[in-house]
Amino acid sequence: MSDWVRLSSRDQVVIALRPIAAGEQLELENGRILVAREDIPKGHKVLTEAVAEGADVFKFGYSIGKAKSDIEPGAWVHTHNLRTGLGAILDYSYEPALDEKQIPAEPEATFQGYVRPNGEVGIRNEIWIINTVGCINKTCEILAKRGDARAEAPVDGVFHFAHPFGCSQLGDDLKYTQRLLASLVNHPNAAGVLVVGLGCENNGIGLFKEAIGDYDPRRVKFMSAQEEEDELEQGLALIDELLAYAGTFEREPVPVSRLKLGLKCGGSDGFSGITANPLVGTIADRLTAAGGTAILTEVPEMFGAETILMNRAADEAVFHDIVTLVNDFKQYFVRHGQEIYENPSPGNKAGGISTLEEKSLGCTQKGGRAIVRGVVPYGQRTRGNGLQLLEAPGNDLVSVTALAASGAHAVLFTTGRGTPFGGPVPTVKIATNSDLARHKKNWIDYNAGRLLEDKAMPEMTDELWAQLLDLASGRYKTHNERNGFREIAIFKDGVIL
């Protein structure tokens, strides 16, 4: 195995595949020898040619920032000598670069899913308890625990997702909460939903029903706790009705074109853009070529790579939607007086990510090469297929929740640092490196680090694809499901009374 990897012939850096000590010699392409000027951690960047102060440094074939000073070959390139090149809100022009026709169409695949009366498809047959307000969290927690004890096959369990909002929120902030929770109510992984309110909150059941829209009373039940003498007794009675309804569903063959996968990365490292993210990109390409839906989010982690996505817009209208998506999120940071361009998280920096554009160029690889077919507002559900861009921040819990609310049946979550959390839907943790996969075997569902060892991309695409079809068919559960780690977080941009 080589000591390094270069991602593009245009790149001025290589990535260390092991810790490199000062004075070590690295043999580059064409037999050229590079001497390390300092100790360089695994996953970090080594400069291969001189770069002058203020000049761009290239990785992935694109600039990942500008040199803070003159940098010599063999130097460690990181935050001490590299700064972002990002800044103001920009104007963009549409320069189409569409190559989806090069993505081979797959033979029609199927999975065993649950077809709902409204025509939607779920990959789980669960009962969800959605509370309109945080004041009722603990009551819902008790109901979920007692209801789960009553659940029998084919019901996969009864689950509750605590949150602190729904009361004293105003304007768009309240609408975000209502829209997000309403989209979860309508998620097809839930065969039945119990909506629980307190009775005096801004997000009262009456208003919340308007956000939900048309619903099947067999599938969605409502309870206002203040109106019940014994809310636990009444809640369990309603759960029993939902369990009986959910018990009428059976798995049946469904075309993979009905599958929706969310794409997310969290706690990245220097290998994210080499292994896990491009691997997920091949899955996104295979799914969209088959008529399915891949949903990419983390808008701030598109900054610096946004033109790649803009130029893959299906048409000029979608292009303008992407421009609005990116610039509105930049304006959000400006409005709050926050400078975010130099701010990969501490974990990302420790893993070898130096600037936001470096993170973004790795992040956007999860979208593969597919044409961008649409943009989905925060909290709303996807209406089309193909590659969709979802309005949400980079925060792991907030963005995974938004992906679930948009309709994703499961989320592919790449990570170089590791995290145990899971969202409302199966959250597939894909390690960027084998050290993490070995160290956190109770967190990681798939090890993409083998791409740097003994596996080729086509082989691993086939392997992960088969695992995902098993996941969708109920033959496999993720660690977050087995561990009972299911959480939501709601985006907040407003005042609370």
Image (cartoon, rainbow, N blue to C red):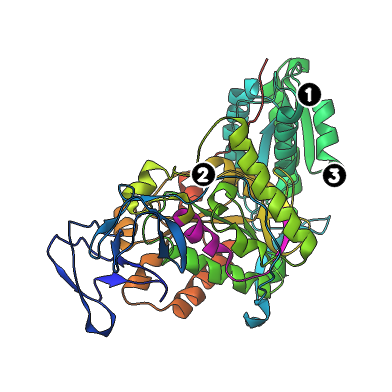
User: Along the polypeptide, which appears first: circle 1 or circle 3?
Assistant: 1
Q: Which residue is mark 3?
A: 216
Q: Which residue is mark 2?
A: 396
Residue 207 vs residue 385, the one in the foreground: 385
- In which quadrant of the rendered view does residue 233 lie? top right
Q: Which residues are magenta?
A: 358-375
Quarter occupied by the C terminus? top right
* Amino acid type at image mark 1: Gly
Query: Would you place residue 192 above or below residue 458 in this image?
Result: above
Q: Position of residue 340 (x, y in %)?
A: 50, 40
Lateral position of residue 32 relative to residue 366, left or right: left
Lateral position of residue 195 relative to residue 102, left or right: right
**Contact (CB < 8 A) between labels 1 and 3?**
no
- Secondary structure at badge 1 equals loop
Task: Mark yes or no: residue 447 visible.
Answer: no
**Local crowd size for mark 3, using a 10 Å CA cut-off: few (<14), some (14–19), many (≥20):** few
Q: Tell me which residue sits at (17%, 60%) in the image.
A: 37
Q: What is the CA distance from the residue labelled 2 to the residue labelled 3?
A: 32 Å
- Secondary structure at badge 2 equals helix
Residue 214 vs residue 484, the one in the foreground: 214
Q: What is the CA distance from the residue labelled 1 to the residue labelled 3?
A: 19 Å
Quarter occupied by the N terminus? bottom left
- In which quadrant of the rendered view does residue 387 lie? bottom right
Q: Position of residue 378 (x, y in %)?
A: 69, 43
Please, which residue is most extreme toward the left here? 23
Which label was assigned to residue 331?
none
**Local crowd size for mark 2, using a 10 Å CA cut-off: few (<14), some (14–19), many (≥20):** many
